[in-house]
Amino acid sequence: MNHPVMPLSSRLPRVGSTIFSTMSALAQAHGAVNLGQGFPDFACDPALIEACHAAMLAGHNQYPAMPGVPALRQAVADKLALQHGRRYEVETEITITAGATQAILTALLAIVHPGDEVVVLEPCYDSYIPNIELAGGVAVRVPLDPLSFRPDFERIRAALSPRTRALIINTPHNPSATIWQDTDMQALADLLRGSQTLLISDEVYEHMVFDGRSHQSVARHPELAARSFLISSFGKTYHVTGWKVGYVAAPAALSLEFRKVHQYNVFSVNSPAQHGLARYMRDPAPYLQLPAFYQAKRDRFRAGLAGSRLRLLPCEGSYFQCVDYSELGPLAELDDRAFCEWLTRERGVAAIPVSAFYGPAGDAGSPGRQDDRDRQRVIRFCFAKEDATLDKALALLQEL
Ligand SMILES: Cc1ncc(COP(=O)(O)O)c(C=O)c1O
């Protein structure tokens, strides 16, 4: 007997497959160089793999402690203290997560009550808005400046209301490759002073900051740290995005609520990877060398595009380079998605349209956003690739 499929009302009716999967599939179909999705095409340090292997052989193969392996939490606490001068308590303030994406969702589930508002600055990482909605919240979307991608604190102020539960920030920023300055953090502290608004600070590109600048972690700003979930990802820092291990550092009261959700969601995170990372982190050299490593790739990529008609946007941090293609004559008529498809099919290089980092069109919430998006002719390349991969892409792009 045939049973009819039960009708299901989607929790995320507006979510389809992501632009990253779409562009990667198109890249594969056309044999294109994939500078779309943000992941390295080179191997991690063999010493990190050896450390994880040793952990497996040593028997670290059962459930680890719910908040994370103590040695890894200690390593994270030491790193944060060394870099930013704030010492988070290992026992109560640091939790290891299954990547930053889980940390962001878990933080939202822990703090958002139905109908609470969470402010996001668009363009933004694509999980934020669906995560807010899954938590029963309402995403209030505030555009970054459409030309500079800088925060407009007056617009953020205007978006805050008594219902605002949290604000999500991200520096270095995906997709724009801008970073926040000390003055931005001060402005944010001024704005939030006296409010109940929490901060979710997505710092996954914390070690990719260029030209001698420093990363403005919330951990450097005591007033902000007191209301923040600081989130980062070992995947980005150690070239192992597929391992999905990250962390959240937050004051004890916030971490307590975070862990209540974490323990019934993930419970605990891959044990040998945690032990291996803890051992590998004893040496700070790999993350201290990361800015120079990625700056060299950034410079190679930018130099290669300098003769083309693509206008390079500033790249202060992250492993992304955005370009404006509005000087490309008739091609500039194409919207950024159509242009990325053209580039993949006709030139053999895949990129991501920056419009994909905005929430659905036609929503209430952020006046002017649709205009901003329509005006933009900006696409994002990922330069976390072997030099040979970058050179191959550059040879194809230089003619533009
Ligand atoms: C801004 C931002 N946040 C979070 C993540 C996800 O990090 P993870 O792979 O650790 O979940 C990414 C990955 O692309 C990202 O760009």
Image (cartoon, rainbow, N blue to C red):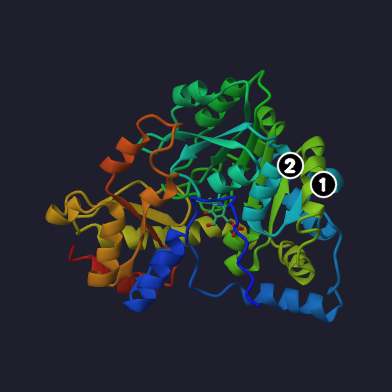
In the image: residue 318, left or right of residue 23: right
Mark 1 lies on a secondary structure that is helix
Reading the image, the residue beneath label 1 is 260
Residue farthest along the bottom direction in this orientation? 57
> Cβ–Cβ below 8 Å for labels 1 and 2?
yes
Q: Closest to the observer: 273 or 301?
A: 273
Residue farthest along the front direction in this orientation? 1
Reading the image, the residue beneath label 2 is 110
Three-letter amino acid code at disc 2? Answer: Ala
Task: Quadrant for the N terminus, please.
Answer: bottom right
The image quarter in which residue 380 lies: bottom left
Task: Give how far across and how far down residue 38 sits, in percent.
Answer: 47, 62
Q: Disc count in the image?
A: 2
At 57% across and 60% down in the image, what residue appears? 236
> Which quadrant contains ligand 1?
bottom right
Task: Give how far across and how far down residue 88 sits, in percent.
Answer: 78, 42
Q: Earlier in the sequence, mark 1 or mark 2?
A: 2
Residue 297 lies, with reference to residue 131, above or below; the image says below
Q: Closest to the observer: 30 or 216?
A: 30
- Rounded to the nearest angstrom, the CA distance separating label 1 from label 2 is 8 Å
Task: Give how far across and how far down residue 232 sits, in percent.
Answer: 64, 51
Three-letter amino acid code at disc 1? Answer: Lys
Q: Say whether residue 395 is visible.
A: no
Residue farthest along the top direction in this orientation? 194
Task: Give how far across and how far down residue 316 sits, in percent.
Answer: 43, 47
At 42% across and 55% down in the image, what residue appears? 320
Task: Quadrant for the C terminus, please.
Answer: bottom left
Q: Say whether residue 234 is visible.
A: yes
In the image: residue 398, left or right of residue 177: left
The image quarter in which residue 328 lies: bottom left
